[in-house]
């Protein structure tokens, strides 16, 4: 085993994330960690990566285990160059480079340390490693000038490629990877999957990307503060999960029946116990039995993918729908007439110092679906940001070199952005939602806000007081959904909407968007999501 965790328990404030949790990762094994948003998946990675030390339980590792943990956010090192950021994880590179530099500049005269550094650099190919890394980043469409610039200038997808390169050159035994394909284009995702499948290191990856889940050896699910293990890939997981959940549904149904029967006996005994000592003894026995059954009757979290639900028999299906885990509830309203032309793009040429693309045309009306496809850097997000700038009467950052963007005057756009507007980050969740509704001049009192938070699976008391910047990736995604639907839009503009969402939430979003009557313009690299929404494809 590379790493074994036993009896792990973790709480944050009043919330218990998991308790008495056990897991392991073997050499070369590719393991996916899934679970509902806010269950503690990223926290678990931080514990295993020796970043979070505030937990109960024990972790044992292979001797001299080298572990690398990816980062989701790069605020703390935004000014560090991508190249230097990768080199920080190359074993002993920075140490020996400093020894060489100091010796050659005459700052130190330790010949032994210098000789050791020369040998280490030679044996590990470190004299040329900067050029090798730059070449790798160029393969990921990150040119040298960007690679040697600050991380802050990179897009979300480019930062994911930087993290991938950091893992590739880390020579780690165990890679702890958090949502690696978020913001990656379809070619980048294929590159990641190929690399993950071939790398000799053990991998524990937090992901709900169904394309990635098809290429793992095992899936572990964090649910009800415990870990369940499923051997095989995503298809295997769906089959095993359906079977287990069917059994759990039947068992829970039977537990409730036993509890109801026990309660009836207690109620009858309560009426009869005064009649005789024998009745009093029976009542005490029935009450004790009832309390025992009640303590044992704990509702598990039930979720089965909707395709598998269709194959359930009627009795089990009814019980499942009655007891299944609460999901986000998306209600879509457009409150608009059926406009045939909400947005028209004609012969558009768009870019910065020069066009990223030319002569692109499409239109979106009521019920239209348009999918923008392209590599990172092809201009997908530039199109979205330019349309939104025009909608908000702002000067776009990009330059329109030719063509036209025509927006229907009565349009209301709901947008899902890759990154949350910085103005919301320092606000508490409740304050941020209030600010959203206030910006649309819509009434929203405390009761209404709490109802909205509950609808999107936030705790109206505990989560409402958290700052947006402190929310998990999945919670931030759900906040984005609240913001997107707040103004009852008739056009949705979606930039990678499935990033960070868990599997049930993705399914709910897909269903809501299929039922949505307005127009949709979307960017996605989730092949399952694209197949669900369909529509016209515009390839840049």
Image (cartoon, rainbow, N blue to C red):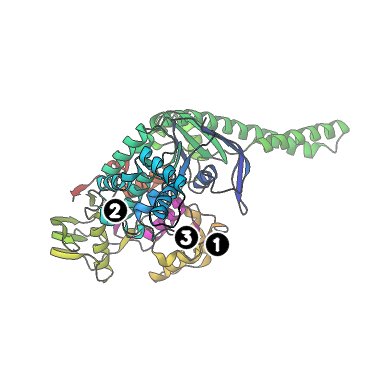
Label 2, label 3: how many angstroms apart (C-alpha)? 33 Å
At horizontal 60% and vertical 46% (from top left) the residue drawn is 10
The dot on residue 469 is 3
Instruction: Determine crowd level at label 1: few under 14, some 14-19, many 20+ residues with C-alpha closer than 10 A.
Output: some
Which residue is denoted by mark 1 in the rendering?
A: 465
Residue in the image at 20% along x and 48% along y = 536
| x, y percent for residue 179 | 41, 45
Which mark is on residue 517? 2
Badge 3 density bin: few <14, some 14–19, many ≥20, Cα 10 Å: some
Residue span colored magenta: 465-494
Do the residues under discs 2 and 1 have CB atoms within 8 angstroms?
no
Picture residue at 36% right of the left edge, 32% below the top: 197
User: Where is residue 225 shown, x and y percent of the image?
Assistant: 57, 41
* Residue 470 among magenta residues: yes
Circle number at residue 275? none
Count of numbered circles on the image: 3
């Amino acid at each position: 085993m590379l790493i074994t965790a036993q009896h792990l328990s973790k709480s944050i404030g009043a919330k218990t994330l998991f308790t008495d949790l056990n897991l392991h990762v073997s050499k070369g094994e590719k393991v996916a960690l899934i679970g509902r948003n806010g269950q503690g998946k990223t926290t678990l990675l931080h514990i295993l990566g020796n970043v979070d030390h505030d937990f109960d339980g024990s972790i044992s590792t292979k001797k001299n285990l080298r572990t690398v943990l990816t980062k989701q956010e790069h605020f703390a090192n935004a000014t560090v160059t991508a190249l230097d950021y990768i080199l920080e994880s190359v074993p002993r590179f920075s140490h020996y480079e400093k020894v060489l530099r100091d010796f050659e500049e005459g700052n130190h005269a330790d010949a032994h340390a210098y000789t050791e550094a020369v040998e280490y650099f030679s044996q590990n190919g470190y004299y040329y490693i900067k050029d090798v890394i730059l070449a790798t980043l160029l393969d990921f469409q990150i040119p040298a000038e960007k690679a040697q610039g600050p991380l802050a200038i990179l897009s979300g997808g480019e930062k994911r490629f930087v993290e991938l390169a950091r893992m590739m050159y880390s020579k780690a035994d165990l890679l702890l990877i958090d949502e690696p394909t978020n913001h990656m284009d379809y070619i980048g995702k294929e590159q990641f999957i190929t690399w993950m499948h071939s790398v000799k290191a053990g991998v524990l990856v937090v992901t709900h990307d169904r394309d990635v889940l098809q290429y793992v050896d095992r899936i572990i699910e964090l649910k009800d503060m415990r870990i369940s293990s499923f051997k095989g890939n995503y298809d295997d997981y769906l089959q095993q999960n359906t079977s287990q959940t069917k059994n759990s549904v039947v068992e829970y149904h039977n537990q409730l029946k036993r509890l109801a029967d026990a309660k009836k006996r207690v109620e009858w005994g309560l009426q009869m116990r005064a009649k005789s000592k024998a009745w009093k003894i029976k009542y005490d026995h029935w009450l004790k039995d009832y309390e025992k059954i009640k303590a044992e009757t704990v509702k598990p979290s039930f979720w089965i993918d909707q395709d598998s639900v269709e194959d359930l028999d009627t009795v089990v299906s009814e019980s499942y729908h009655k007891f299944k885990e609460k999901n986000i509830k998306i209600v879509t309203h457009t409150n608009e007439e059926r406009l045939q032309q909400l947005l028209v793009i004609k012969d558009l040429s768009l870019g910065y110092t020069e066009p990223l693309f030319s002569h692109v045309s499409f239109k979106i009306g009521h019920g239209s679906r348009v999918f923008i496809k392209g590599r990172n850097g092809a201009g997908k997000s530039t199109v979205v940001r330019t349309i939104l700038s025009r909608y908000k009467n702002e000067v776009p950052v990009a330059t329109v070199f030719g063509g036209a963007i025509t927006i229907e005057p009565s349009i209301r756009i709901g947008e899902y952005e890759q990154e949350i507007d910085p103005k919301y980050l320092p606000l508490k969740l409740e304050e941020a939602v209030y600010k959203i509704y206030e910006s649309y001049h819509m009434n929203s009192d405390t009761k209404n806000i709490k109802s909205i938070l509950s609808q999107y699976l936030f705790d109206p008391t505990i989560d409402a007081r958290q700052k947006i910047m402190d929310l998990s990736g999945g919670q931030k995604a759900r906040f984005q959904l609240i913001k997107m639907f707040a103004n009852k839009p008739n056009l949705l503009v979606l930039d990678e909407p499935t990033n960070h969402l868990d599997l049930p939430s993705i399914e709910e979003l897909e269903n809501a968007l299929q039922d949505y009557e307005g127009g949709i313009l979307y960017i996605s690299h989730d092949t399952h999501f694209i197949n669900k929404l369909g529509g016209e494809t515009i390839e840049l």
